[in-house]
Image: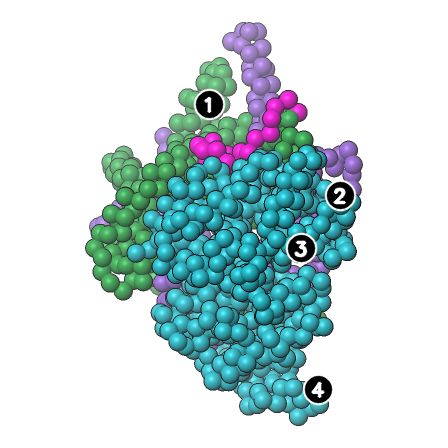
Chain colours: A green, B purple, C cyan
Amino acid sequence: MSFDFAIEGEKLMMLVYGIIGFAAVMGLLLLALGKVDSPKDRWVAIGFLAPAGILLSIGLIYPAIRTLTLSFFDSSSTSFVGLDNYVWMFTHAETRETLRNTALWVLLVPTLSTAVGLLYAVLVDRTRFESFAKSLIFMPMAISFVGAGIIWSFVYAYRPTESDQIGLANQLVVWLGGEPQQWLLEDPWNTMFLIAVLVWIQAGFAMVVLSAAIKAIPSEITEAARLDGVTSSQMFWRVTVPSIRPALIVVLVTISVGTLKVFDVVRTMTGGQFRTSVIANEMYNYAFRYDEDGKGAALAVFLFLLVTPIVFYQVRLVRQRRKEAR
Amino acid sequence: MSSEGRVRKRLTSRTASLVAIVIAVLWTTPTFGLLISSFRPELEIKTNGWWNFFGDPQVTMANYEEVLLNQGLLSYFINSLVITIPSVLFPVAFSAMAAYALAWTRFRGRDWIFIGIFALQIVPLQMALIPMLQMLSPVQEALIWPYPTATVWLAHTCFALPLGIFLLHNFISELPGDVIEAARVDGASHARIFRQVVLPLIVPALASFGIFQFLWVWNDLLVGLVFAGGGPDNAPLTVRLAEMAGSRGQEWQRLTAGAFVSIVVPLIVFLSLQRYFVRGLLAGSVKG
Amino acid sequence: MASHLQRKLFALVGVAALALTATACKGGNTDTGAKDKLDTPECAAFTDYKGIAGKTVTVYSPIRDADGKLMEDAWKAWADCTGVTVKYEGSAEFEAQIKVRVDGNRAPDVTLIPQPGLLESFAKAGKLKPVGDKTKAMAEKNFTKDWLKYGTVDGKLYGAPLGSNVKSFVWYSPKMFKDNGWTVPTTWAELITLSDKIAGEGKLKPWCAGIGSGDATGWPATDWIEDIVLRDQGPDVYDKWVAHSIPFNGPEITSATDRAGSILKNAAYVNGGYGDVKSIATTTFQDGGLPIVQGKCALHRQASFYANQWPKGTKVAEDGDVFAFYFPAIDPAKGKPVLGGGEFTAAFTDRPEVQAFQTYLASEHYANTRAKTGNWVSANKGLELANVSNPIDKKSVQILQDPATVFRFDGSDLMPATVGAGTFWKGMTDWITGKSTKETLDFIENSWPK
């Protein structure tokens, strides 16, 4: 018998212990923080930041430092090689190709998914089937990458003209009287088709966050605009978009950062072949498949550098907000 | 705004519905194709398109039988729940606390800490796995617990914090300052303001971050594989489903059904959390 | 209000503390003085493995699902008799995950590793333990030097061979051959004549192939090249090529690649059922040979394990729907070159129960038990043909045990991973989609780690 109540019970007890432990930690912390509260905020702030700070240090800060160090060492991480890995990265013949593709991904995925998500959120807002309609767009997010891979291989599959098509895209082409295409073969179009997959997944994220933001627009504002007799498109551009600007920025930034890191789509659909590779995919290959820790680490550091423009933008944003608050 | 205006309004609302329907169809068709495929026999799936189903409906439950009646699936299901629930609770709570501190307490350097945490989002998960394993293994041994589940919780929590803090900070810092100032003047501690004023106001934000964290953990394969291993004692559902394709991927048609088995729980979570996205909850809290 | 909350919180903390104490107490019992059953008659075969009862061995490998289950069934009797618990885990992400686990101090006790190159790098990094004396003796008794050398690093045996597969097979449909009056070719010349004949008749293309395999796209094409280097140049050149003592873009490999191209890049020959030459790159390896059962293709060069890919109900036998013949040699006088692969049992720890398990897996008792559970081939000399379950596995075992056979291990598993799991795959994919042989081989040569 494969189902053992004792073992399953033990697992569920683990869950209970975990939640009790968590509640105890949170409760004690908030209790203690209530006691030490004083006009000076520093100690309270440290207390509030402590759980996140400790976990971030072991989970991300230490690994980030380790990666930076590794990038100056050779493939087996034993001897110091200075900037060799970085020199290799920029002289490597395929770097141009992966850079071009990464740029395409980072430009297109955030803009397209945000545009679709926003448009859809506005269109279905306050309609009768809103909940159902939203779950349709949300569904791709709920499907695992394994499932998404199969779904899209069914869309892009190719069979020659004389046989039955199994891919939807080619069947449509054939119905319209065209020749079936090998979608994933010719660059740069193949990258576009891969990008479509991530847009399909991320639009749900944009839609949910933006929809929540739209709902937070005070109804006085929309009512006032409506009384002024604005058209739907005026309402969209002059009321909705400005009111949800912070949420829009959050969505764009989050998807951009996520897109820089993402490689599952590329890895499962083409394996980075046919000139579709992106930096994150190369990083994974070098660090885990080719046993070239130094080069993999250098690529990871490079990814980190690519995000600095967004970080600077955030710095500006935070400063602005402070000024406004004052 | 005479009759002309009204006609135009109706027209845009008609195109609006049309656009919404087109998007919905585009977004649903691929998944719908997979749903149809999951009920088709193996040979049919592999030799012709799913739309042929309507001309020649051959229905089989074989894929679902393989997936559902597979030994121990329930066990993996429980593992997934045991992994996911704390992995959503921890980061939501810790992120909210950190975001509150970064938005509403005053101390030097807080903006830089916020920017630093934001930048950590880019640290690729893959690069963090090995050092984290090295650090967490002793923790697990210290706990003397035979299941590595606790380390999975901590791993998921670590990876979720930068995004969580970033998202929630944006909501929390938009809350009206006078409410919080007034509470401070009344002598309320930060802990109390956080619990009684801030938390109720940011429920929609907590719900949306919670949903995405839930999805990410539920569908995660990598963290589960690395920290929980692949055995029936600890491994999540995704690990088992991925394995079902067979050693050389020969049984991949089973994954069509697998995808729908694992989508059920996230959809339920989404639909049940939907009610927290209610209009007006944040109304009056937006500046201006 | 505040004090009420406080009381509740303290109660919670108390419960949590109790819970943790209870857990800590439970963690203590690992060895409960378990006993073996070696004195019972059904355990007579295992009396060499005494004194390890109550211990646990963890095993990690890429073998999973049905194959993993069959394997666990095969060693179950040993585990029951000796009282050892074998915790098995198979994963699709093995190649990357094993590295993460080893570096993260969570290595399994035993790994069944299909890449001698990976085994070598773990051995050189000091992570693997050489096999114990008993395992070594068992492996030397049951496997040929050809096989043992792939598990040996710097003169020490780290991995005992386990399962094997034969890659030098061409799949075909016996029925289609019979209906058309074709005969199974036994020489390279006959193979080409037959291909020309099928192509000339114009009913179907003679060959079909698929090299798509997600993140491993390209590997089936590298098998083609390896198989043809063995035939076109012979095993000595093959060994030099794999060890990089001759360049990847030299005349030997160029000649072999062009010969492979005379089939794979010949528009008259490929790609039966799928379209033009380029469609080989986007067809998955799982689908590659399926046009044979649909009557759209006649020949498909692929390993013995392709037997699992045929649709359910397809009879795999010499008189069935599909079967495979030996990919013929160009010059039969030089022997019978066979390309293949397999796994090696290597260990990261050297506890007695781990070594005992390794010894058992190398034994003829395990080989025969495993063969009886089905769907398995090994080069183990003690494996009796009668225990091998299906026709294609029987044929594989015959080839592996044939004295005329010159066996060589899949070269891409022996080369540095940058090439063997990287640029070789990528290069061959580009080659299929139009790059010239010279450009392709130059690209791979330049990527070889210095």
Residue where numbered disc 1 is placed: A236
Residue C235: x %, y % from top left: 47, 61
SS label for mark 1:
helix
SS label for mark 4:
helix
Q: Nearer the viewer, mark 3 or mark 1?
A: 3
SS label for mark 3:
strand
Query: Farthest residue in the front direction?
Result: C333
Residue A120 belongs to magenta span? no
Q: Nearer the viewer, mark 2 or mark 4?
A: 2
In the shown orientation, is residue C225 left or right of residue A9?
Answer: left
Mark 3 and mark 4: span between their CA atoms? 39 Å
Q: Residues within 10 Å of mark 1 (few under 14, many from 20)?
A: some
Residue where numbered disc 2 is placed: C180
Q: Nearer the viewer, mark 2 or mark 3?
A: 2
Which label belongs to residue C280?
Answer: none
- Residue C413 visible in image: no
SS label for mark 2:
helix
Residue C38: x %, y % from top left: 64, 90
Mark 2 and mark 4: span between their CA atoms? 53 Å
In the shown orientation, is residue A180 left or right of residue A285?
Answer: right
Residue A178 belongs to magenta span? yes
- Residue C405 visible in image: yes
Total numbered badges shown on the rendered structure? 4
Which label belongs to residue C324?
Answer: 3
What residue appears at the point 39 percent right and 66 percent down from the top-left corner?
C121
Of mark 3 and mark 4, the one earlier in the sequence is 4
| Chain under callout 1 | A
Q: Which residues are magenta?
A: A175-200
**Where is residue C207, by image quadrant?**
top right
